[in-house]
Image (cartoon, coloured by chain):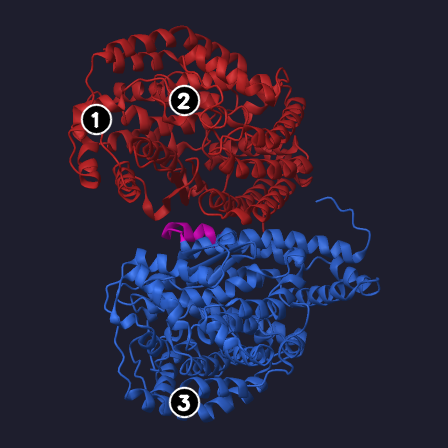
Chain colours: A blue, B red
Amino acid sequence: MSNAATSAYEDLQQRHRRLHHLAHLQAIASWDQSANMPAKGNEARSLALAEMGGLMHQLATEPALKELLARAEGEALDEAQRANLREMGRVWRASNALPQSLVEAKSLANSRCEHAWREQRPANDWAGYVENLREVVRLAREEARLLAESSGLSLYDALMDQYEPGMRATEVDRVFGDLRQWLPGLIREVRARQQSETTLQPQGPFAKEAQRALGLDAMRLMGFDFEAGRLDESAHPFCGGVPEDVRMTTRYREDSFLPSLMGVIHETGHGRYEQNLPREWLGQPLAAARSMGLHESQSLSFEMQLGSHPAFAALLQPLLVKHLGEQPAFEAANLHRLLTRVSPGYIRVDADEVTYPAHIILRYEIERALIEGQIECEDIPALWDAKMMELLGLDTRGNYKDGCMQDVHWGAGLFGYFPCYTLGAMYAAQFFASMRRTLPDLDARIAAGDLAPVFGWLNENIWSQGSRWTTPELVRRASGETLNPAHFRAHLQARYLA
Amino acid sequence: MSNAATSAYEDLQQRHRRLHHLAHLQAIASWDQSANMPAKGNEARSLALAEMGGLMHQLATEPALKELLARAEGEALDEAQRANLREMGRVWRASNALPQSLVEAKSLANSRCEHAWREQRPANDWAGYVENLREVVRLAREEARLLAESSGLSLYDALMDQYEPGMRATEVDRVFGDLRQWLPGLIREVRARQQSETTLQPQGPFAKEAQRALGLDAMRLMGFDFEAGRLDESAHPFCGGVPEDVRMTTRYREDSFLPSLMGVIHETGHGRYEQNLPREWLGQPLAAARSMGLHESQSLSFEMQLGSHPAFAALLQPLLVKHLGEQPAFEAANLHRLLTRVSPGYIRVDADEVTYPAHIILRYEIERALIEGQIECEDIPALWDAKMMELLGLDTRGNYKDGCMQDVHWGAGLFGYFPCYTLGAMYAAQFFASMRRTLPDLDARIAAGDLAPVFGWLNENIWSQGSRWTTPELVRRASGETLNPAHFRAHLQARYLA
């Protein structure tokens, strides 16, 4: 690439643009690995992605960067450029904490484990899975040790900081500790109240093609730009790709359409965040989504704040009739009862918003102990069984596929990520509380089918801001205060116990 | 990547393995660009692929390579390693002839032109297309000039040598000159004979999903490994991906299933060549397919030598009934007449094997004049119209979309490629002649539905050989002589005039 940079800052910008281009190919090849790739392609794909991971790490740790970052600090920059430089420094520190050999070993081990998991999970093959997982955990511990060394954080904090910069286990303990106190009682109270409700169950089967068409219409309702993204299938739903070309996935069950439909609405929240990151900054760290917790706050704004809103069922109902035919169960009041039904279940991604935090607390406790070396991979199933019984009263013994093998995260080497889901739920509740203060007629607008004020508020306050502010500052600017879990409790009480 | 190389040859092997990994991501992202990508993703994808093209070029031209290649020449290597080293040298010379800036500019211009073509072609928008094409041609001429300078070849030979190493325009002129003499007469003779035939036309429409299922069954019949590849849709059918994960595409017309079906059988020939390249050498130049002409000889072995074989219709017939229902037109004798119907048409990829060479002669003459600067892009339509009238008696005036805009090649910067199609048809005829000498009962075996002897012969003589031998040597080993166009003429006479 020709280098006509006249300042250290411009040189850095060029290097980040280059990384952005390579990350594009990596993102598409990773999406393809989950959505398209046949079995025999995996070994070559894993090697290719590991090579690319190593190469990008090499570019992100070039010796010249240290001096360029220092020189750029002294250059005349406006506020946005300065924020971009701050984020460049964050990327640089994170990259330099890990040697290239570890980055490549992780990419390879994670790819292998995740790929094998796709067949091991349906086969309930824990023994096969744990063989690969052991290596993934070994490398994650090594990663935690090195990140902790360079940052001065504890082992688990060092990993979590990659996904939720600035968040600490002590803060998570505080918030989750509070939650553990009132959540079981709230679940009991909601379930007692819902016991007297009569809810009609939709009658399947629901053909995959009809569900797919329904999902596409739901994405349209939620404002997804189909000229800059698509919807496909994968074993575990996710939102990947690049801001210019968002790749959402879902999975279908013919006996039930709600998991896929609400999953699609969830991923659309992620997708619109990506599609609306500050366009003029794309390729620079400033244009990246702020954190995984904030990302989840957007998907939960779509799936829970809107999707389970008392007025939303009436917006969905005509789409269900169009694609699945008329059914008494699709009547709006019944549909709303279905969408707000609280019921402890095995599967995190299918959980209602009230029991969901229990799934997260369980995973947080297990993965933290795993990273800190208090337990080994072999201990996971027994701990999982005990905590599921304690938190949700469910027996998961021997059922690995709906237990500790249900998520892709650990197999893919993601430790320190799970807390983001519940932090996201809390941010979303806080944002909607703030929105209602600014827009007193918000609920009436939603009831009238006008979702534009919600999307407008999110775009202005979150999406278009990228990584311009730190998380606490972004949350404060958007809502007038930093993370306050009281909004989440108030939201659940208002929706489920009012 | 750690470098434990103990010899120059091993060092070179490691570098090629690295290039192979990066080429993997490039191949998948390119396939995705044609098969999946939404419109707004194109600018970012083009930039990403250009960045990767530049990076790979940088790796393929590292100054250390020259000395490594020289040192490896003096090392103790077995015959296969020596052939691999020869191919490494070929790759190195080709890479060094072009500066990185040109590689990147080409990638960008070609991506842009090809992407816009996808909407311009259906809109018959020649004026819009030629805007982009001018830049593609300008860069192709620059490429030809540099390649010619470093190789001592003429401008057009220098481009053609990238696809068909060793082939020269003088040789093409000789072979095509011969063809031009007897082809028009043969077409007339065949058409006169077919005039008295009664052929039932299949009655559509044929649903896309049924055609897709039929195509997948045809791929099974032809031995495609679905654990190492897949079939998707794109505007222009191609066979991409990597040997470990072959990505074939097709397109569907609801009024006619034969173009897609025979296109799929064609691409399956390309796909099986890739899937059966020498596995233990993957990642090294030795494991690459030998040339584009030989690649086409495999797709034409499948589509024409087998697909239009008098016994093949009986193998297809039950698949048609299974997926499209019973029709009198599917009766084997009628189906064979449909598959061997000779009829001059606008579209190259839909052409029968008798008129196909006329499409190639036309393109060869135009692209050669274009590269040599005797004509400009603006002259293409008039020349196209004149040559189509002369060679096939068809009027294409004003019909750009079925005329000079029908192919992706020129827009994608591929000049010097077209002759490979007809060279491939000639190689295929020569291989089947050789096969029949070795296996006198070949036609009886095919008639009995046993295609294994054909696949076995191709695998042993072509697929598994990769780039171990030069093209003339490979052809000589497989058939006892170098390229002899008499076999193609004999094949057409035996099939169409016997």
* Residues tagged 2 and 3 counted as in contact (Cβ below 8 A): no
Few, some or many residues within 10 Å of mark 1 (<14, 14–19, 20+):
many
The reply to the same-chain question for discs 2 and 1 is yes
Residue type for callout 1: Leu
Q: Front-most of A63 and B398?
A: B398
Q: What residue is shown at x 34% (from left), y 80% (from top)? A: A341
Q: Amino acid at mark 3?
A: Leu
Calculate the distance from the C-alpha at mark 2 to the C-alpha at mark 3. Answer: 70 Å
Q: Report whether residue A426 is seen.
A: yes
Task: Please give the chain letter of the residue carrying mark 3.
Answer: A
- Residue A210, given in percent of the width and then of the height, sits at 31, 57
Nearest to N terminus: mark 2 or mark 1 = 1
- Dot 2 falls on a residue whose secondary structure is loop
Give me the disc on residue B128. Answer: none
Q: Disc 3 marks which residue?
A: A497
Answer above or below: position of B23 versus B74: below
Percent x, y of residue A144: 57, 74
Q: Position of residue B302 (x, y in %)?
A: 32, 29
| Image quarter of residue A338 | bottom left
Q: Chain of mark 2?
A: B
Left or right? Give the position of B329 relative to A320.
Answer: left
Quadrant including the C terminus of chain B: top left
Q: Which residue is mark 1?
A: B335
Q: Is residue B8 above or below residue A219?
A: above
Residue B309: tell me if it is visible: no
Q: Where does the magenta region start and end?
A: A36-47
Res B359 → quadrant: top left
Q: Is residue A86 magenta?
A: no
Q: Which label sits on residue B346?
A: 2
* Quarter occupied by residue B56: top right
At numbered mark 3, what does the secondary structure look like: helix, strand or loop?
A: helix
